[in-house]
Image (cartoon, helix red, strand yellow):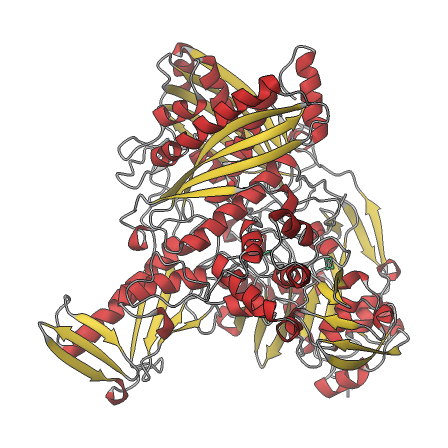
Amino acid sequence: MPRLRWSGERCRLAWGESDVAAQTSTSPVESQLISFSVNGHSVDVSVSGTCRLSRVLREDLGLTGTKVGCDAGDCGACTVLLNGEPVCACLVAAGQVAGCEVTSVEGLASRSPIHNRLQTSFLVHGAAQCGACTPGMLVSATALLERNSSPSEQEVMDAIGGVLCRCTGYRKIIRAIQEVNATSQQLSPQAGAAVGARLIRLDGQKKVDGTEIFGADETPAAVLTVRVVRCPYHRARFRFGDLDKFVAAHRGIGMVLTAQDVPGIDCYGVIPRFADQPVFAHDEARYRGEAVAAIVGQTEVVEALDLREFPVTWDELPAIQTIDQALAADADQIHPERPANILVQGRVVCGNVDQALHESDAVVEAEYETGFLEHAYIEPEAGFARRVGDSIEIQACTQSPYMDRADIAKILGIAPEKVRIIPTAVGGGFGSKLDLSVQPFIALTAWKLKCAVRMVYSRTESIMSTTKRHPARMKLRAGANRDGKLTALDFSADFNTGTYSSWGPTVAGRVPVHASGPYCVPNYRALTRAVHTNIVPAGAFRGFGVPQAAIAQEQLYDDLAAKIGMDPLEFRILNALDNHSPTVTGQVLGEGVGIRACLEALRPQWRLARAQTAEFNPHARTPLRRGVGVAGMWYGCGNTSLPNPSTVRIGLKRDGRIALHQGAVDIGQGSNTIVTQICADAMGASISRFDLVSADTSITPDCGKTSASRQTFVTGKAAHMAGRKLRDEILKLAGACQCAAVEFGNGFVTVFEDGVRKALDLSSIPLDQHGYVITSEATFDPPITPLDENGQGNPYAVYGFGAHLAEVEVDVELGTVRVLKVTAAHDVGRAINPTLIEGQIEGGVAQGLGMALMEEFFPGKGENLHDYLIPSVGDIPPIESILIEDPSSIGPFGAKGIGEQAVIPTAPAILNAIHDAVGVRIQKTPATPDRVRAAILAKARGGARG
Ligand code: FES
Ligand code: FES
């Protein structure tokens, strides 16, 4: 019998599980029996002949190793072999495979001996990060290697050219494929030698054998599906028609939810003080893509719905899309409590900028603009929720389980302890999966219906409704003296933060701290504003606004170096921060300021590349001109002047194994592995002894969000402290001193002191409340101070530093730019796992290249991966990573963060290289061919900026 669970006519029925099972046999689409072979087994499926093969594999046959990133042939994540040839399974109709042989990633191992070697090679080379593209890469590579066991780099690039990867920068994938026959399995390092080892990622095997569970990969029994109705206009008032009639008219639709159905507080946001986003809009939708209602029911019925039939009437309203429109005196106020549409302002001021500029020997000024950027991770948002008694469980992709827990509790009106967040593997996040996406919709509907509810965003829905990188409009002036010393920087920037606050306050606050670059600037003024518009919220995207600021500041410093006749690299080296120079917030770091070392590490390649360019350009008979550019960066690890704790728990088990409860979500960057490496060496235990208990709010303590390059530093430090504490407990039990050695065995621990050996039998020690022989827990919160009204203080405990050198070739007739090589030097404090760090650097370079040359999101247009272009393998040049280790005494074993840092200097280095090649500045990025060509033509007419 249907069970009505809450008042409201629209809840026509809420099924019990058996009811649902009966209902789901009803399909609105005609099925046919299709027989084919999958991974060597004959299968018969009863589906529509037009059903996508990817869907049949995943939903009907449970082969979720085949990923779906776009359903449009753009990403290649769904690549399978069809009669031995790679195809996009999302573009193949089920009816086309009758009688054919299909091989998915799960079947590669039995198909070809190459595959095992290829899996190993991917692991050893760090070619899988989040793993969302990995099945498509492996399938494409297998097809290549089956016909060519020793492919050239170009042949590899051709073979994987249709598969997009947003994490790795492709170079490690190319090497993994080329070196498939030369790679052997790595051994686990000895106890005490994990830090610094090129350990393969501990969660890697599942990524290469297709068994990793991402948000869309698990479907509970009797699950219903939710689909969200979103506003098609940038701004519109709306009225619903007869929703009860709509539900009644659609067999298989269970209910429709709107704003009035939110039982708790209909307002959420990543920064509680600025929370302003409703789950569903009330009467007026304020951006294109804003949710107004959710429809839940049987999967086939919900998916087949034509949403144009949904009873809602829209009245389009004038929308504010640009910063100028938002700041106009007569502009509508998007949030009445935020005058002039300004969400928040940031400010860092030191010295006397105006006087210093007035007295400088040389002054330059410029204006730069950057556009919206889409994160374009390969895994669209997905997950499911189920109600368990008076609690709710949510299994979905996320970067911030505890923040999700707090917001969902608020929305449902229940205690946070009644919400369990179980993060799935995350197929790339880069900041956007810090914000809620599917979670409120699946939580609300599962809560109301008391059954499991699932949601998988389409690519269009993902791009339309999730956060973007803030567009920036920046104005700046800088001065220097004849000796090359920077005297002052005056920087101001407005960021289009969209309709809701998301991470706008963080961007507006972080940028003024960083806009000086990693240089000594004695007189400084940086003012920022986050400005509301009727655009999808802009949020966190690798760097929180610092990459935009670096584009402006690093180009301006090149102009300044030119004006005083200095080499751009030497200008940076001369002005680089050191351990004793104050930053623009007055912070004296005292140690670990590795920017000069990074810049100096680039010198040999800089000189070589400059010499080669000087040789090439005068003799070029083609329209090609080469250039070399450099840019530096710094980036504070963790929150800006805010508490930022991580807590790690470790349990020693009776069998001598060690449970590491760490709640840091690994989104591909490798925190599962790096935190374990740190903990292992802190304890003196072998990595092979560890059982990793990954993020789950019911069993792992809060390790904060995965963002701001904080997990290696903050969670790693907590793991280090917890590891030391556990070791100390063991020594105490053994009555030994701190200097004693500890050896972990199966069922016992041995302590060695002054030649005396003492074994602790773990089976004889009573278990504690956590079920362990010994439990230790530690919390680390980096030491920071608040910033005063001039932004003075110690906003971060530790900074990462880096510098990139880009070599480019510009076609002056076409305006196209090809990056020939990037050399990237990064001070990481201590390279806990060099392979994973290189992976972060190469991935950052690829995203920076996209930012410089091709990526721009136009709200309302191109909400797919064929219009929104991200770099493919053919766009990525060789990348040389140089790791500098200038340790921080605060970080674990001296380590600092690297994730955000890696993307920051690439774009300005490329833009400086373009200027070096053809003498033009591209004022609005990306430097697309039309903009570059226009700038070249303008220069020919007498200007030099485009
Ligand atoms: S899912 Fe098939 S190409 Fe993207
Ligand atoms: S590893 Fe390729 S998309 Fe994440």
Residue 10 visible? The answer is: no
The vertical placement of 840 against 342, above or below, is below
Q: Is residue 26 left or right of residue 698?
A: right
Q: Percent x, y for residue 326?
A: 66, 33
- Count of residue discs: 0
The vertical placement of 285 against 556, above or below, is below
- In this rendered view, identify the residue nearer to me: 647 or 605: 605
Q: Is residue 755 left or right of residue 603?
A: left
Q: Quadrant of the C terminus?
A: top right
- In this rendered view, identify the residue nearer to me: 637 or 181: 181
Q: Is residue 850 left or right of residue 203?
A: right
The residue at the point 46 percent across, 49 percent down is 838
Q: Percent x, y for residue 227?
A: 75, 64
The residue at the point 72 percent across, 78 percent down is 40
Q: Residue furthest left?
A: 754
The residue at the point 18 percent across, 73 percent down is 731
The vertical placement of 720 against 521, above or below, is below
Q: Quadrant of the N terminus?
A: bottom right
Q: Quadrant of residue 50?
A: bottom right
The vertical placement of 748 against 299, above or below, is below
Q: Is residue 839 left or right of residue 284?
A: left
Q: Percent x, y for residue 328?
A: 67, 28
The residue at the point 65 percent across, 69 percent down is 105
Q: Quadrant of ligand 2?
A: bottom right
Q: Percent x, y for residue 191?
A: 29, 68
Q: Quadrant of residue 678?
A: bottom left
Q: Quadrant of residue 136?
A: bottom right
